[in-house]
Image (tube, rainbow, N blue to C red):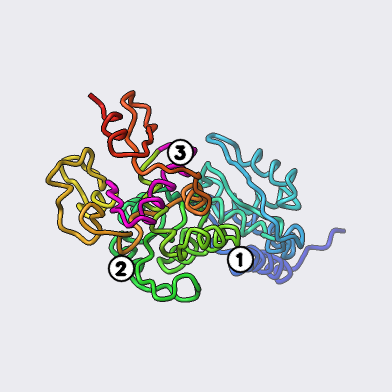
Amino acid sequence: MRRLVPLAVIAVIVICGVALFVAIPSSAARMYGPPSPRLSLSQVVQYSIRLLWYDGLLTRPAANDESKLSFTVTHGESVDEIARQLQLAGLISDSGMFRDYLIYTGLDTSIQAGNYRLGPSMSIVDIAHAMQDATPADITFVVLPGWRMEEISLSLPTSGLNITPTDFMKAASGPRPGFDFLVGVRSMEGFLYPDTYTLPRVTTVDQLLDALVRNFALHLTSDLSDGFSRQGLSVYQAVTLASIVERETMHPEEMPMIASVYLNRLKIGMNLDADPTVQYALGYNSIQQTWWTNPLSADDLKFASPYNTYLNPGLPPTPISNPGLDALRAVASPADTNYYYFQAKCDGSGYHVFAKTFQEHLQNLCP
């Protein structure tokens, strides 16, 4: 004779089942956040059980390794394939756990294609959330040789850095403590080293300026400093002259010759007569839409400014651009010449022809 299960026992079983049905998703939600609204109730329970079964492995790194790897997600790539590739790369310990977490949270539908910097010290949860934003943490910032501070500042709005041109110019026009060669120097013109920089997006204006000036300091070797001294120049004077040399030619191999011309002029007290100093004094040309007016008119050469080396002897008050290493080396180790003049060749090559006397110089002028 079969014995019937008491209704009370059945009621207890049902109550316990309902409690578990509620408790498991609640526990998963406390640990990993709310489930995706796209999941059905049975799916919520199913994935909640899976996440709880992993017992914290979702928040543990795959390895104690702080290195970073480049990982690319392509357009249309499936979650299963992404998870498989992550495991193969050693970035996660289990592709199934990664997939389950993505589906539970709904993050599987919002992974962005792009390049990521990921490391095994990141947990599955960390990596899943990192893949929701393909915007790189770092940006590439380029300073070209011969740019003046204004040109650097105007490249900022499209750089990825949250620094305005106004903030940059204000900070760069003030003193920069911590660098011996900048003692007494207020403007950073000339010392913002041209190079390609990899910087965090969150870089501040002060951090940017420190990076540029620090790079200059790294390239200011004893060989350069000794070379400047041999020419009778301080670092500041040498950088000022290099900033002119930088603007005079597009061909680095010519720079030692051009540096020799200007140094020869300085030695005999002859005006530098350097077009770039007039261009710097004139500032932005709204018609040509450039900071470097070209060609210069006869009236331009009469422009009243302490920077106009046609009107004023010696070097201009400050550098007029930010010279690269080739120009700095040219000033430190100029060619040994007795040239006092140079003129652009008439073939449009950008090269120059040099002369010892003014008469020879006149003969080199283009017809």
At a point 37% along the width and 61% down the height, the residue shown is 189
Instruction: Give the dominant element type of the magenta stretch: helix, strand or loop.
Output: helix
Dot 2 amino acid type: Lys
Check the image and report above or below for 150 versus 7: above
Mark 2 packing: few (<14 Cα in 10 Å), some, or many (20+)?
few
* Whole-percent x, y for residue 161 in the image: 41, 57
Q: Residue 22, which numbered label?
A: 1
Q: Quadrant of the N terminus?
A: bottom right
Q: Which residue is mark 3?
A: 254
CB under 8 Å between callouts 2 and 3?
no
Secondary structure type for disc 3 = helix
Q: Nearer the viewer, mark 2 or mark 1?
A: 2
CB under 8 Å between callouts 2 and 1?
no
Q: Which residue is mark 2?
A: 170
Q: Quadrant of residue 30?
A: bottom right
Measure how far apart labels 2 and 1 are at the Cα level. 60 Å
* Whole-percent x, y for residue 274 in the image: 29, 48
